[in-house]
Image (cartoon, rainbow, N blue to C red):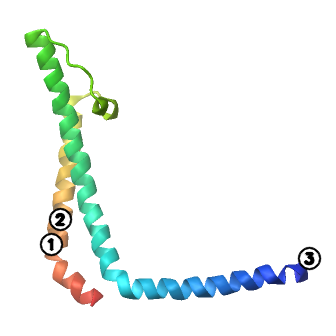
Amino acid sequence: EVAAAWPVLLAAALASVIFSYLHLFLVGHFSQLMVWSSLTVSVLAPLALGGFGFWSVYSQDDSTLLEDRFNVTKHSSSLDAFTVTTGDKTWDIAISASLVSLGLLLAISAGCAGRKIDMILG
């Protein structure tokens, strides 16, 4: 049965060689772009998640403030369905602050190491 499958094995070997050289070409030409884009995502993701956490904590405060003081009910928006909470405001703020701090720490680290990264990548 293996002898009958030689065209598939030959095609797989040929495809692996082609994709290996393609990978080497892409890494050689776009390594700097790949490193900086991954650093950018690593900085922006915790900042965005922490900001969204702060927004969800304080948007809940706004709705309870409206209900308590002015006897007005806030109509739910489409973003209320995506509000993620632990149920404890202190923990929500701590997690959000930790995420924002992590994003800022990564941004400072990437900024300080920027010249070294550029020098290493050429």
The answer to the question of whether label 3 and label 2 lie on touching residues, with beta carbons closer than 8 A, is no
Q: Residue beneath label 3, please?
A: 1
Q: Nearer the viewer, mark 3 or mark 2?
A: 3
Q: Earlier in the sequence, mark 3 or mark 2?
A: 3
Image quadrant occupied by the N terminus? bottom right
Secondary structure state at the residue bearing disc 2 = helix
Please name the residue shown 30% across and 70% down the image: 37
Distance CA(mark 3)–CA(mark 2): 57 Å
Helix, strand or loop under label 3: loop
Q: CA distance from mark 3 to mark 1?
A: 58 Å
Residue 44, located in which quarter of the rendered image?
A: bottom left
Q: Is residue 98 above or below residue 55?
A: below
Q: Is residue 32 left or right of residue 19?
A: left
Q: Does residue 63 show up?
A: yes
Which residue matches tag 1? 111
Residue matched to label 2: 107
Name the kind of residue labelled 2 in the image. Ala
Could you say where residue 14 lies in the image, as x and y percent from the top left?
67, 87
Q: Between disc 3 and disc 1, whose residue precedes?
A: 3
Residue 11, position as x, y percentages in the image: 72, 83
Q: Is residue 93 visible?
A: no
Image height of 89 relative to 120, above or below: above
Closest to the observer, 44 or 78: 78
In the rendered view, does 32 fall on the left or right side of 100? right
For the C terminus, give its image quadrant.
Answer: bottom left
